[in-house]
Image (cartoon, rainbow, N blue to C red):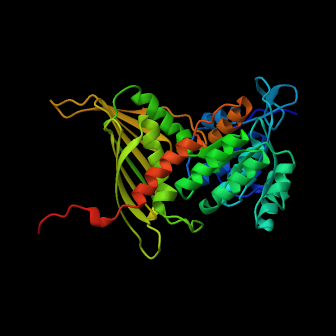
Amino acid sequence: MSRRIGREDFAPHGKSDRHRKGWPRGVSRLSPAFGLNYGYLAHTGDASGHVARGMREKRALHLISHSVAPSSAGFEEAGNGEVLRRRPMRKVIRTGVIGIGKMGANHARIYATMPGSHLVGIYDPDLARARACAEACGCTAFDTVEALIAAGVEAVSVAVPTSKHRDVVCHVLALGAHVLVEKPIASTVEEAEEMIRTAGRRGRLLMVGHIERFNPAITAIRDSVGSEEIITINIVRVGPRPPRIKDAGVIIDLAVHDIDLVRYLTGQPVTDVYCVSSAHGDVYEDTASILLRTERGVSAQLTVNWITPYKAREIQVITPNRLVRANLLTQHVQSASRYSAEDGSYLVHDLYVPYQEPLRAQLAAFLDAVRRGEAPPVTGEDGLRTLEVALRAAACRTDSILRCAS
């Protein structure tokens, strides 16, 4: 029996009978067919910590209407059987995930519920972890990568430690699957180049998971700026140290997001890099201030660290006519313009940004590229160019500073 989605489906903790009948606190009783669990997302954030604070009911309904699974009749339906809209059937891509840490588990969650994806299985050296994730996602935990690909997987997310990217990705490409690899593409330029060559030689797609390109806040910034000249970009990306990162510092693991955003927003290569970094109790740096200049003179200042007690992701893009700023976690975007020298006034307005989970948008773009047989939106070459800049920043030493006379 079908029913309409009501306010009780989005009730906060303790407000609905559905939450008092054995359902975990903070998790709404929505069918997995919806693809996105509103109750969980609203309270904890998505795979990258993007928090949908203050989402209205109609916003959640908008999410659901774009996240439902296709039925065999060519309709898209809610999990309760109610038809929401009709759209052409997509070719279903058989998907898999290698590496079931925090990000890999989120890849699996989305593949399991995404229209046009059939999650065949997952692989992780920790078989108990793989089995737990497989049970939650309704797929199979395989004991080898070869067995996973042999099960007919066409497209794979690789979410293993960066130091293992080259070996795992090249192996999967050689076995015949298309690959999306988490950022950064690799630990070294040479490893990245080998991955790109392998993909070309095998005729397979290689996409790099620079997830912020798929953040609706970034899309809103690009649309607002349009063809205006960008003068400078300022980005702050800070938070506590993630305990799972053992093989890279904050520049290679975190600042690559922002280096890629500078390249993406300006459409220009980075030509000049300067960085001051430091390490506190570790061999890898945990704080860095990076200055970049692009081919046509856009400057960018990036601040990253793993020592701030709370997570912050903020960006400012400045043009001759406006300043556009965004919180990349809440996806709140503001534009300030029309400054008056007479009274110091200026106009500020909020830009409408329909909430979307960036990882879901990224994986959808990957599968669409596989269906079309076209280059993915973030290529291996993109990942390589971003890595080159990050490595140059990490190689900077404080002895290159021009010191002032005392």
Residue drawn 29% across the image and 29% down it: 321
Q: Is residue 6 above or below residue 162?
A: above
Looking at the picture, tell me which residue is in the foreground, 386 or 113.
386
- Where's the C terminus, which quadrant? bottom left
Residue drawn 19% across the image and 64% down it: 403
Q: Is residue 285 above or below residue 380?
A: below
- Where's the N terminus, which quadrant? top right
Image coords of residue 178 (percent x, y): 72, 43
Image coords of residue 61 (percent x, y): 66, 34
Image coords of residue 145 (percent x, y): 79, 57
Total of numbered circles in the picture? 0
Quadrant of res 133: bottom right
Q: Is residue 348 above or below residue 136?
A: above
Q: Is residue 183 above or below residue 398?
A: above
Farthest left residue in view: 406
Q: Is residue 59 left or right of residue 64?
A: left
Res 328 seen here: no
Q: Is residue 64 left or right of residue 1?
A: left
Image coords of residue 163 (percent x, y): 60, 62
Res 95 seen here: yes
Quadrant of res 289: bottom left
Q: Is residue 265 left or right of residue 11?
A: left
Looking at the picture, tell me which residue is in the foreground, 65 or 275.
275
Residue drawn 62% across the image and 45% down it: 196
Quadrant of res 251: bottom left
